[in-house]
Image (cartoon, rainbow, N blue to C red):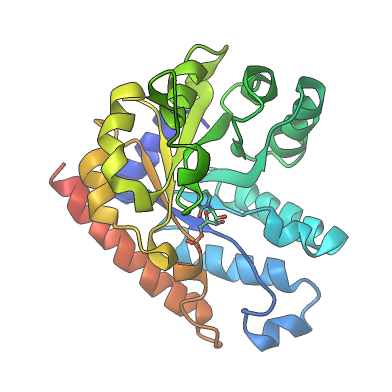
């Protein structure tokens, strides 16, 4: 998917919500455990209940890999379901990959070709040759960790080297890489005060912003400092939406929470 198609969808739906599909079998309604594929059935119910309110879904692959072959099959069924029924929706494999070039090439094939996600998250630590293989696919994107939402982000990402914080160098240097127009960046909602500086370096790039909802980040603060002319934000909420209820009404409650966020986004877009 191109970024203009993504922006068009944002304008149509008045939403820049990304729903995280981080499925934990201990948290889903018990009756689903009796089905053949509880993870897929849970995801399908969430997608069916929320697809008009969200522009993006982000399964975090850890939650599938943890269940072995069955988990991977659930991930495959989920992305096929999205691609077949909602091809307009942007999809992210939150896998945080990155390795020496030939290995990254295989990761890229796995997520962008075989599973056919629109994008995959990557870690920048191994540098240019570890990220460029993810940028070789037309209309696909690598979403690189820049300033993450967790406390540990301050361990390395904000450290200064040569008079500049590491996350700023990651943003600046990555702009010089081949096909860098296919890059997007992860910036945590819990770091709202950093968005102004980040926008000085990557004014036009899409930012994937996790950390609202369960991690306490503020949607309005992120929008105030992080939004650009074409919106340029994908705000993720996972647990806050998908576990709004652990009872039989989970899909209905997920819709209510997604709608609450979408309405806040719609109001922000109206004044933008
Ligand atoms: O900096 C980061 C990068 C990735 N994540 C991931 O996003 C979701 C957030 O889930 P919530 O339940 O809404 O807190 C999850 O998959 C994380 O691994 C992040 O939180 N921060």
Quarter of the image for residue 132 reads top right
How many numbered marks, from 0 up?
0
Quarter of the image for residue 139 reads top right
Query: Considering depth in this image, is 133 or 109 the residue closer to the camera?
Result: 133
Query: Considering depth in this image, is 112 or 128 the residue closer to the camera?
Result: 128
192 vs 178, left or right, is left
**Percent of width and height locating residue 27:** 62, 79
- The residue located at (46%, 29%) in the rendering is 166
**Percent of width and height locating residue 88:** 50, 43
- The residue located at (60%, 21%) in the rendering is 138
Q: Is residue 225 visible?
A: yes
User: In the displayed image of the protein, which residue is found farthest to the left?
Assistant: 271
199 vs 71, left or right, is left
- The residue located at (45%, 73%) in the rendering is 254
210 vs 139, left or right, is left
User: In the displayed image of the protein, which residue is found farthest to the right?
Assistant: 69
Query: Considering depth in this image, is 227 or 112 the residue closer to the camera?
Result: 227
**Percent of width and height locating residue 83:** 62, 46
- 163 up-or-down from 268: above or below: above
- The residue located at (73%, 74%) in the rendering is 38
Quarter of the image for residue 72 reads bottom right
**Percent of width and height locating residue 115:** 73, 42
48 vs 98, left or right, is left
- 201 up-or-down from 241: above or below: above
Q: Quadrant of the C terminus?
A: top left
Q: Is residue 227 visible?
A: no
């Amino acid at each position: 998917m191109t970024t203009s198609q993504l922006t068009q969808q944002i304008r149509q739906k008045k939403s820049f919500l990304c729903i995280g599909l981080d499925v934990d079998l201990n948290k889903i309604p018990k009756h689903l455990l009796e089905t053949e594929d509880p993870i897929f059935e849970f995801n399908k119910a969430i997608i069916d209940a929320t697809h008009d309110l969200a522009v993006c879904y982000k399964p975090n692959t850890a939650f599938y890999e943890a269940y072995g072959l069955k988990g991977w099959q659930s991930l495959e069924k989920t992305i096929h379901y999205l691609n077949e029924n909602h091809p307009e929706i942007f999809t992210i494999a939150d896998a945080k990959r990155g390795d020496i070039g030939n290995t990254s090439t295989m990761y890229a094939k796995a997520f962008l070709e075989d599973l056919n996600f629109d994008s995959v998250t990557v870690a920048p630590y191994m540098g240019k040759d570890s990220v460029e293989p993810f940028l070789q696919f037309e209309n696909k994107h690598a979403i690189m960790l820049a300033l993450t939402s967790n406390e540990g982000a301050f361990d390395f990402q904000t450290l200064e080297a040569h008079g500049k914080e590491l996350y700023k160098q990651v943003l600046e240097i990555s702009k010089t890489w081949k096909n860098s127009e296919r890059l997007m960046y992860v910036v945590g909602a819990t770091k709202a005060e950093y968005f102004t500086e980040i926008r000085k370096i990557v004014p036009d790039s899409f930012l994937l912003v996790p950390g609202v909802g369960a991690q306490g980040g503020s949607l309005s603060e992120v929008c105030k400092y992080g939004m650009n002319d074409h919106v340029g934000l994908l705000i993720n909420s996972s647990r806050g939406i998908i576990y709004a209820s652990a009872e039989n009404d989970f899909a209905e409650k997920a819709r209510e929470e997604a709608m609450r966020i979408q309405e806040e986004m719609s109001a922000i877009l109206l004044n933008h």
